[in-house]
Amino acid sequence: MIIQITTVGNEETVNEIIRRIRGYQLAFPHSIWVVTEPWANANYQGADDVIVVPEDFHCQASYKARALEYARRLRIDRRLNDFYVKILFVDDDGVPTKSYIEKVLVADFDVCEGIPAPRTGYGRFLSHMDDLRTINCLYMCSVFQGIGHPIHVHGEGLCVRGTAEALVTWDYQMFASEDLVFGHMAVIDGRTWGFVWDYVEITSPFTWRDFLTQRRRWLWGNIHAIRHVLPLRSSVLLVGLYVYGLFTFVVSTIGIVLALTGALPLQSSVAPWLVFSMAVWLSMFALSGVINSGGGASKGIRRVRDVILAVLLAFVTSAVAIGVQIVALLKGNPRRFDVIQKTDPKARKTSLVTTSDHGSSTGSEPVAPVPEPVVLVPEPVETRSDLPWNMVDGR
């Protein structure tokens, strides 16, 4: 397995991720790669290989996807595009649990992923705004990835076979949402998809500005993918997902207001079902709170508090998810890959809390970061070239 961390100089958290993974003492051959840009100077400690993307490297993709494509071609040069090689992609603000790594290693799929859990610093208001990410993955990703055709794809913990990456590639005209594009193109190219029931521990944004920046990049990356990259059937699924989310929130909100004000009389036979559906909805937030508070320093009373807050903030979390999408849409396409701070600006040491696979904290504290710049790279010029079948199939 190649565990690849793609970054632009976020030294503190990358080194903490490497230390965490080394601490697992994985009992199978593996290598940790850090893929970065030449202008992002940093000292990555413990990596087996630091891959610097040359400034003159060009392909259709831009920004992070460009770096991923360079690493993919490098693996082909090194004959690491084999069926028995797996690449686990890790963002520089999250870390997979030991059991997650072990499960994706043996998962009999070309592409698979698991559950993102905002465990780092969980309990902050903005971390609860990410409860929906866990919930959506539990009921959406698990179903559609499980039946072999994803709708939404997230990059945290995406794991692919070497042969699948060589065939699908990252070389598409995109500036963001590279994980979404890769996941859907894998299906189009006949690769098998699966879902793993384990966690990648991620970090929620620390400021509202970063929260909006992140969501704006995701939204416009998806819009660009829908309009210019993905095939029709994938685009229809994604548009349907957005419409479904907006429709259910608006209708449910109006219904609750009308019911509470007496403007919507409910039949006695219907009311219990509505109460039951509300209880199920709230229980999903409670489950998210249990999951996300179980990987860090949250214990005892604090963990109970976090779970209760997840439930009490359920409507706020849903409203923010819709509201931030509207604001991001109105602000327009950033047309670039804006990165956000990965560590708490108010803290003194790294905020990527070092925990064991069972959730016990070793007491590492956060470090004040140097804000990361906007990633600027040359626009792509080349076109994708297909690989010979004997190369991508490992024969």
Image (cartoon, rainbow, N blue to C red):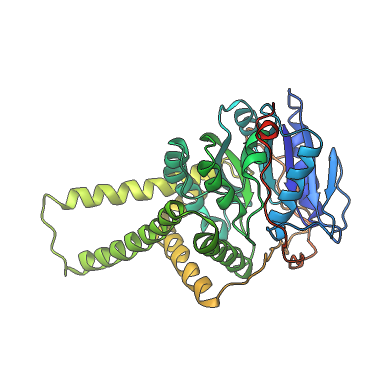
Whether residue 342 is visible: no
Which image quadrant for residue 21? Answer: top right
| Extreme-top residue of the structure | 27
365 w.r.t. 189: above or below: below
Instruction: Decide if residue 255 is on the left or right side of residue 365.
Output: left
Q: Residue at x 63, y 70 (%)?
A: 335
Front residue of 1 and 103: 1
Residue 220, horizontal then vertical, whole percent: 55, 66
Instruction: Decide if residue 127 is on the left or right side of residue 262.
Output: right
381 w.r.t. 5: above or below: below
Residue 215, horizontal then vertical, whole percent: 56, 64
Residue 154, horizontal then vertical, whole percent: 56, 49
Instruction: Decide if residue 109 is on the left or right side of residue 339.
Output: left
Instruction: Decide if residue 320 is on the left or right side of residue 123.
Output: left
Front residue of 242 and 275: 242
Total number of numbered discs in the rendering = 0
Which image quadrant for residue 125? Answer: bottom right
Q: Residue at x 22, y 68 (%)?
A: 258
